[in-house]
Amino acid sequence: MTVHPGEAYYNPLCREKLVIRTPAASTKGERAVMDMYVEPGGFAAGYHTHPYSSERFILVRGELRVHVAGRDIVLDKLGQSVLVPPGTVHRWFAHSETEETFVVVELNNRADRFEQLICRQLFGLAQDGKTNKEGRPNMLQSAVTMSEFSDVLRFTDRPWPVQRVINGVLSPVARLLGYQGCNPEYLERRPFETAELEELPEEVLAHLHGGEPAQGHR
């Protein structure tokens, strides 16, 4: 099920809300733009790579620390951005202890599958209490989900060849026990809320590939 402009998806464990600005369906699945709101203490669920996709973070307000390719980059000024190339290890963290952070995230390549994995599956599991405190599913769920979406996201706590072997062994057991790579109920779950998109400053719009309208509505 596709997502639509203004729909908001929330991960209570990672303290992260994504509001859809440009859905992948409007770009034939190739590009998505999301407004990411991160509460103090928020974080991405584990160090990971996007094997075939690039991801750009552009700061609107607050502070975000992005660990990318072995170094930390702190975004703390309007319009500051960082580009994560395909296959690059990264993870982000809220850097302000008191202020919500607002970052525009642009993902290029396989954006439709990114929406399905993040907004639907991983956020749905977190909402239902089926992940650990870092927002990661258990080994059986992870085996089927991360196998199905290995072209979109790979966690990096183990080398990928090792993960493939582990997932290959666990996936048949997981499916026998009823685990699914993408749960149908999450594809049908209504958004956390529907929000009016904030107007973006020119300093932010200047970074977006192809440009974006300054304001959008559902």
Image: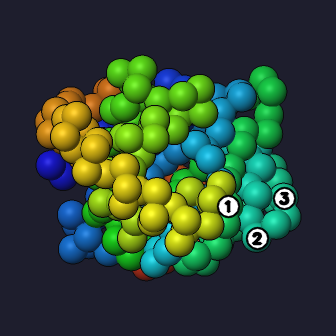
Number of marks in the rendered image: 3
What residue is shown at x 28% (from left), y 44% (from top)?
173
Distance in Å between CA atoms under marks 1 and 2: 6 Å
Q: Which x, y percent locates residue 192?
A: 33, 27
Q: Amino acid at mark 3?
A: Asp
Residue indicated by mark 3: 72
Q: Amino acid at mark 1?
A: His
Q: Which x, y percent locates residue 35?
A: 48, 47
- Residue 112 lies left or right of residue 43; in this view the side is left
Closest to the observer, 179 or 133: 179
Residue indicated by mark 2: 69
Task: Residue lying at the far top in this picture: please name it.
Answer: 129
Q: Which x, y percent locates residue 112?
A: 28, 63
Q: Which x, y percent locates residue 11?
A: 47, 31
Residue 183 seen in render: no
Closest to the observer, 205 or 38: 38
Q: Nearer the viewer, mark 3 or mark 2?
A: 2
- Residue 158 lies left or right of residue 185; in this view the side is right
Crowdedness near tag 2: few (<14), some (14–19) or many (≥20) residues, C-alpha within 10 Å: few
Distance in Å between CA atoms under marks 3 and 2: 8 Å
Q: Secondary structure at mark 3?
A: strand
Q: Secondary structure at mark 1?
A: strand
Asked whether the beta carbons under mark 1 and mark 3 sit within 8 Å of each other, the answer is no
Distance in Å between CA atoms under marks 1 and 3: 9 Å
Residue indicated by mark 1: 90
